[in-house]
């Protein structure tokens, strides 16, 4: 009997901090994935329907009148931008809604009192946003293939631009959720900031066709660089240097991640 007790005690070794962090991170990501799949009609379907309407209206109806854009059929030209638009919106929306829901439901305190460091919590939620962005990106890409041929000139750039953009906006959603005090405040930035910047970010046109003042004004839009980097990965054309696009995304990720970790350490916007 004593031997069995000793064996049981030896097996019940406490988890190391690395194991605790790994389990905590996996738990957050799996919960986020299950949430995405459970309410797929709210998280996945709307982007597919919206993309289909864009391709039908802008591609079929307007595209025939526009003609070629940078040497490509208009529908082929806008396809990478529409995919990136879906990735941006879903990465942002997933994190802002999920984290604010946890804050509103008062179960975020369970994470704050757990042995998980803030950077693991932030990384877990951001990973959930990246997962949703990736799933929606694949679905919208499938929709695009029903309407046009979509070559992939630089696969590494396609994947890299999609992931970095998704991480950037997932972090933005996390920060928005931290400071939002009600559900109305989590829709202000997507409506009044993300939507205009996306539509003016070269999704539907090349900035080379804009007049001088508008061309220069567009260069301060960070989404322009992300969309063009993604388009370059598919078509091999870009209105801006791809190097600048990746530099902007990396700097943004470092800054936003650092801010999110520091603010979460201080429980800013959570215990007010």
Image (cartoon, grey):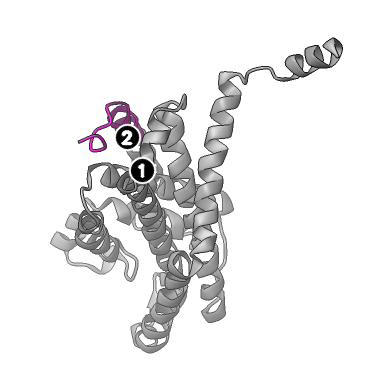
Q: Position of residue 110 (x, y in %)?
A: 41, 35
Q: Report the span colored magenta.
A: 255-272
Q: In this figure, which residue is indicated by the disc labeled 1? A: 171
> Which image quarter holds the N terminus?
top right
Q: Residue at x 22, y 43 (%)?
A: 179
Q: Determine whether label 1 and label 2 are within 8 Å by CB.
A: yes
Q: Relative to residue 267, is residue 25 drawn left or right?
A: right
Q: Is residue 265 located in the magenta-colored stretch of the structure?
A: yes
Secondary structure predominantly adopted by residues drawn in magenta: helix
Q: Residue at x 34, y 52 (%)?
A: 225
For this rendering, which residue is in front, 111 or 236?
A: 111
Q: Residue at x 45, y 79 (%)?
A: 52
> Which image quarter holds the C terminus?
top left
Height in image: 46 above or below 37?
Answer: below
Q: Residue at x 48, y 64 (%)?
A: 39
Displayed quadrant of residue 146? bottom right
Height in image: 58 above or below 131?
Answer: below
Q: Position of residue 96 (x, y in %)?
A: 34, 51
Q: Is residue 209 located in the magenta-colored stretch of the structure?
A: no
Q: Position of residue 165 (x, y in %)?
A: 41, 49
Height in image: 259 above or below 153?
Answer: above
Give the farthest residue toward the left. 213
| Dot 1 alpha-carbon crowd within 10 angstroms: few under 14, some 14 to 19, many 20 or more | many
Q: Position of residue 210 (x, y in %)?
A: 22, 67
Displayed quadrant of residue 257? top left
Tag 2's secondary structure?
A: helix
Tag 1's secondary structure?
A: helix
Q: Relative to residue 256, is residue 119 drawn left or right?
A: right
Asked if one can make out residue 192 in the rendered structure from this viewpoint, the answer is yes
Q: In this figure, which residue is indicated by the disc labeled 2? A: 260
Q: Earlier in the sequence, mark 1 or mark 2?
A: 1
């Amino acid at each position: 009997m004593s031997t069995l007790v000793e064996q049981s005690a030896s097996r019940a070794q406490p988890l190391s901090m690395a194991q605790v962090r790994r389990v905590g991170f996996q738990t957050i990501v799996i919960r986020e994935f299950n949430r995405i799949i459970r309410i797929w009609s709210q998280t996945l379907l709307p982007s597919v329907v919206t993309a289909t309407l864009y391709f039908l209206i802008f591609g079929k109806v307007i595209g025939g009148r526009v003609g070629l854009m940078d040497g490509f059929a208009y529908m082929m030209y806008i396809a990478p931008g529409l995919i990136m638009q879906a990735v941006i919106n879903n990465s942002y929306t997933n994190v802002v809604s999920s984290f604010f829901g946890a804050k509103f439901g008062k179960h975020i305190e369970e994470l704050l009192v757990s042995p998980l460091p803030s950077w693991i919590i932030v990384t877990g939620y951001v990973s959930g946003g990246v997962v949703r962005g990736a799933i929606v990106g694949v679905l919208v890409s499938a929709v695009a293939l029903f309407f046009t041929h979509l070559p992939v000139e630089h696969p590494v750039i396609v994947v890299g631009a999609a992931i970095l953009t998704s991480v950037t906006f997932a972090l933005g959603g996390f920060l928005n959720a931290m400071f939002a005090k009600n559900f109305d405040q989590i829709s202000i930035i997507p409506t009044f900031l993300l939507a205009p910047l996306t539509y003016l970010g070269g999704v539907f046109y090349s900035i080379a066709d804009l007049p001088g003042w508008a061309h220069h004004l567009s260069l301060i839009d960070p989404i322009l660089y992300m969309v063009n980097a993604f388009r370059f990965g598919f078509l091999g054309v870009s209105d801006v240097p791809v190097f600048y696009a990746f530099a902007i995304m990396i700097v943004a990720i470092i800054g936003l991640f650092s801010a999110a970790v520091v603010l979460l350490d201080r429980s800013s916007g959570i215990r007010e």
